[in-house]
Amino acid sequence: MRLVILNDPNEVAEWAARYVKKRIQDFQPGPEKYFVLGLPTGSTPYGMYQKLIEFYRAGKISFKYVKTFNMDEYVNLPRDHPESYHYYMFNNFFKHIDIDPKNAHVLDGNAPDLIQECNKYEKEIADAGGVDLFIGGIGPDGHIAFNEPGSSLLSRTRVKTLAQDTLQANARFFGNDIGKVPKQALTVGVGTVMDAREVMILITGSHKAFALYKAIEEGINHMWTVSAFQQHPQTFIICDEDSTMELRVKTVKYFKALSDVHQKLIEESSSVDQFRTLH
Ligand code: PGA
């Protein structure tokens, strides 16, 4: 695992966007070879999307040969509801870039058969050749996507009932009315994300500090589903200072001392091979 500790959420957004740009550039996607990205929603990745749009407008990156798979979507929320993840992705990212809409996949929480929708999603990911880079955020309870505490660490895409903590955290998006937050969601499983070739998890804010500690300094535990990524061979956690408050000084010092190495991972000139040897 790599823990990249940056000063603030802006630096996290910039680092994450530069990493995505570099991975796509190095991959050299084309009509026969698409780069496959897994994507999150929420407040944490918002700045990364803004930066990626900036890079696209500056001609530094294209999404023409990129396929995306979003992590999750609420059940029974109309697609054009401002809090639906379809709405979020379209308005905050897809409509600003050159991705072909047929390559931008978001689970359909209004599908007539939700189980079939989830199974179809897994198949679409497999048909795309698997995810090259899955980007995720976490909740203060350590969930990744909507894999709430107690989710199987081998879980696949499925219907999930949201935990009280998540309903409370998300009520702010529904006029602070917890009764308006959808109670269920479709979500990729922990196992689905674990299958990605690389995983990059963005964590910011002191309210996520305990979750970051549980994610990396204690054992793998299905009550903190993000901890499963301790067993993934290519995981990056990109975090800000505030979220490191519960970590040991030794942990923080160790990873901060690697900041030059981390910087090389987003430099234009370094090659994929260099990345491989750095891990
Ligand atoms: P946030 O949500 O980025 O809005 O904090 C993350 C999550 O709950 O997975």
Image (cartoon, rainbow, N blue to C red):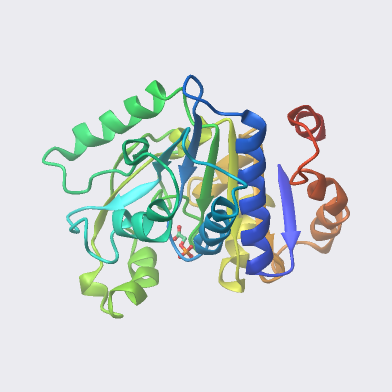
In this image, 25 relative to 104: left or right?
Answer: right
Q: Where is residue 106 shown, x and y percent of the image?
A: 32, 44
Residue sitting at x 29%, y 43% = 107
From the viewer's perspective, is 37 left or right of 80? right
Residue 161 visible, this angle = no
Q: Quadrant of residue 126?
A: top left
Taking depth in this image into account, of 171 and 22 the one nearest to the observer is 22
Mark yes or no: residue 244 visible.
Answer: yes
Quadrant the C terminus occupies: top right
User: At 72% from the left edge and 51% from the top edge, which residue is drawn?
Assistant: 3
Q: Horizontally, is 99 left or right of 10 in the view?
A: left
Q: Quadrant of the N terminus?
A: top right
Residue that extends furthest to the top in the rendered view of this protein: 32
- Residue 278 vs 257, above or below: the answer is above
In the rendered image, which quarter is residue 128 located in?
A: top left
Q: Is residue 75 left or right of residue 93?
A: left
Q: 112 above or below 81? A: above
Residue at point 22%, 64% (across, down): 81
Q: Residue furthest bottom?
A: 176
Count of numbered tags: 0
The answer to whether residue 262 is above or below residue 113 is below
Where does residue 180 sit, x and y in percent of width and height?
21, 71
- Direction left: furthest residue: 112
Residue at x 43% of width, y 50% of height: 145
Residue 261 point in image, percent of width and height: 85, 46
| Percent x, y of residue 7 | 74, 68
